[in-house]
Image (cartoon, rainbow, N blue to C red):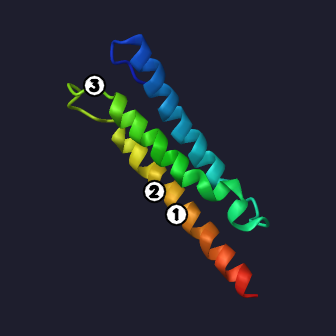
Amino acid sequence: MLLDVGDPARNLLLNACFYGIVLVMLLSLVPWRLRQGRNRWSLYLPLLAIALYVTYEATMPPNWDIRIDLLLLAPMGLVIIVAWGIRLALRARGSRQ
């Protein structure tokens, strides 16, 4: 396990959220087309990432002062948002043509 806070239930939830964010980041990098418009599930990946991050932060114990994990989470969040922006820009450009 990447994170160990001492409580097995918290460890499971924290690691599931962390690896879920990693999975969302990897899925956002896959170059799927947006043929189905707004119904395409890949447009909702940032919402899933936000839900996972909120759960992650809510589960984190308050006595953890050193947060090295944020050095990994911040760039992953940036990749997800940039990939989402590119998808939206491509979608907007495709609908104009």
The answer to whether mark 2 and mark 1 are in CB contact below 8 A is yes
> Between 45 and 27, which is closer to the camera in this rendering?
45
- The residue sitting at the right extreme is 35
Disc 1 is placed on an element classified as helix
Q: Quadrant of residue 8?
A: top left
> Between 51 and 60, which is closer to the camera in this rendering?
51
Instruction: Measure the C-alpha gap from mark 2 to mark 3.
Output: 24 Å
Disc 3 is placed on an element classified as loop
Q: Amino acid at mark 1?
A: Val
Disc 2 is placed on an element classified as helix
Q: Tell me what residue is drawn at x 40 percent, y 34 percent.
A: 56
Which residue is label 3 attached to? Answer: 61
Instruction: Measure the C-alpha gap from mark 2 to mark 1.
Output: 6 Å
Give neighbour class at mark 2: few <14, some 14-19, many 20+ (Cα, 10 Å).
few
Which residue is label 1 attached to? Answer: 82
Q: Is residue 32 left or right of residue 27?
A: right
